[in-house]
Amino acid sequence: MSMNACEDRFEHQRILYDGDAIGKPEDISFEPSNWAAKGALVGEARGRGYTYFVKTGNSDWVLRHYQRGGMLAGILRDNYLWTGIDHTRAWKEWRMLAQLWQVGLPVPRPVAARVLQHGLMYKADIITQRLLGTHTLAELLSQNVLDARHWELVGTCIRRFHDANIYHADLNAHNLLLSKDGRVYLIDFDRSEVRAESKSWKDQNLARLHRSLTKLRSLRDNFHFSEKDWLMLQDGYGTAR
């Protein structure tokens, strides 16, 4: 799979985009209000910040504004220290997604990223392809029990990324998407990176997902996750090639 990565700069913003998906960068908006005015804003989801779902022509996109979490969230909110365009979170995530998508790993295709620099700080946004017909692992487990085949497919998906030495910085039940036909995707690669081969960080990555699942089980009534399910995921992870 090929992609035409292009960069442009106009007014006070820089844009990185797939030239095969977008004709002119001026046609892209990173402002939810602009899409809403066109009747193209079809939904939203709340996490650390807001994620917006856009339908324009034959394209379905996800628009996400970078928002801080943790102790600095109340102070800096959506501001990040400027150390050069290639070090911005949007550029790094877009390029990571492009690399993974082009080698056939199950990720959303990156569409465009924007950085707004203001002095020593910057703000950023990213647009990716929307994976229609999918639900998060967290959503599915809130509704019903997942069978052994699907748990194994989740484990197999994670193993594919680990075999490529891809460290996902926030591997949790909200960032794994499953489709009805059994496909599993991984989303949100902010702060993710390629790491040197090591069993240690891969085990820690899996442990992070396990903590996510056990936390959701403690917070939600009828959240369908058990340690038996985890063993099935591990079976899929261990037998993946």
Image: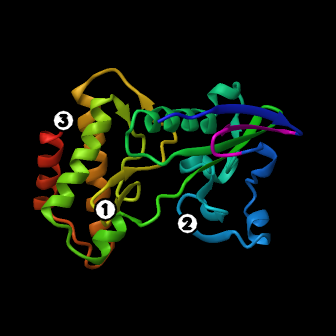
To which residue does mark 3 refer?
Answer: 241
Residue 213 coordinates in the image, percent (x, y): 28, 59
Q: Earlier in the sequence, mark 1 or mark 3?
A: 1
Residue at x-position 73% and y-position 73%: 39
Residue at x-position 59% and y-position 57%: 61
The image quarter containing residue 18 is top right
To which residue does mark 2 refer?
Answer: 46
**Looking at numbered disc 2 in the image, what kind of residue is underneath it?**
Arg
CA–CA distance between discs 1 and 2?
18 Å
Q: Secondary structure at mark 3?
A: loop
Residue 113 coordinates in the image, percent (x, y): 66, 42
Numbered range of the magenta stretch = 12-22
Q: Secondary structure at mark 1?
A: helix
Few, some or many C-alpha atoms within 10 Å of disc 1 (few <14, some 14-19, many ≥20)?
few
Q: Earlier in the sequence, mark 3 or mark 2?
A: 2
Q: Residue furthest right?
A: 11
CA–CA distance between discs 3 and 2?
35 Å
